[in-house]
Image: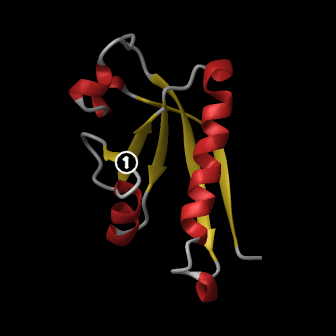
Amino acid sequence: MLGYCALSAAQLHLTELKPADRKRLPAYPVPAIRLSRLAVAQAEQGRGHGQLLLGHAVNLALSVRSTLGVRVMVVDAKDARAVAFYEGFGFRRTASAAMTLYLPL
């Protein structure tokens, strides 16, 4: 196995989003999809597999966005290196947790 990813239902409080991302959103928790797992075998790291898995996860989220009403994908990064990885793909840090990031969908 090269790697895997897992998604689950989640929500994010509106105050966690950047002001520009709050526009046109209702004043209650924002429906979200959580990227609960993303891992690549240690021997395969640095070869683009994480990028492919993340792309797959985002595509899955986009495919159910209108059905589920989700507006963002959320991830809890395990370390600063993971934060940099996600930020490189457009994820933004939440207001209160430096290791929690979101991607507007």
How packed mark 1 is, by other alpha carbons closer than 10 Å (few <14, some 14-19, many 20 or more), is few
Please identify the quadrant where the N terminus is shown.
bottom right
Q: Residue furthest right?
A: 1
Residue, disc 1: 90
Q: Position of residue 81 (x, y in %)?
A: 36, 71
Q: Along the horizontal axis of the image, is 10 left or right of 8?
A: left
Residue at position x 62%, y 60% from top?
Answer: 53
Q: Quadrant of residue 49?
A: bottom right
Nearer to us in this view, 16 or 63: 63
Q: Position of residue 83 (x, y in %)?
A: 35, 61
Nearer to us in this view, 80 or 50: 50
Q: Along the horizontal axis of the image, is 25 left or right of 5?
A: left
Q: Along the horizontal axis of the image, is 46 left or right of 95?
A: right
Residue at position x 64%, y 80% from top?
Answer: 41
> What amino acid is found at the position of numbered circle 1 in the picture?
Gly
Residue at position x 62%, y 19% from top?
Answer: 66
Q: Quadrant of residue 38?
A: bottom right
Label 1 sits on a secondary structure element that is: loop
Nearer to us in this view, 32 or 52: 52
Q: Along the horizontal axis of the image, is 67 left or right of 90?
A: right
Q: Is residue 72 above or below residue 46?
A: above
Q: Position of residue 93 (x, y in %)?
A: 30, 47
Give the tally of numbered discs. Answer: 1
Q: Residue furthest bottom?
A: 43
Q: Position of residue 21 (x, y in %)?
A: 31, 26
Q: Is residue 60 above or below residue 79?
A: above
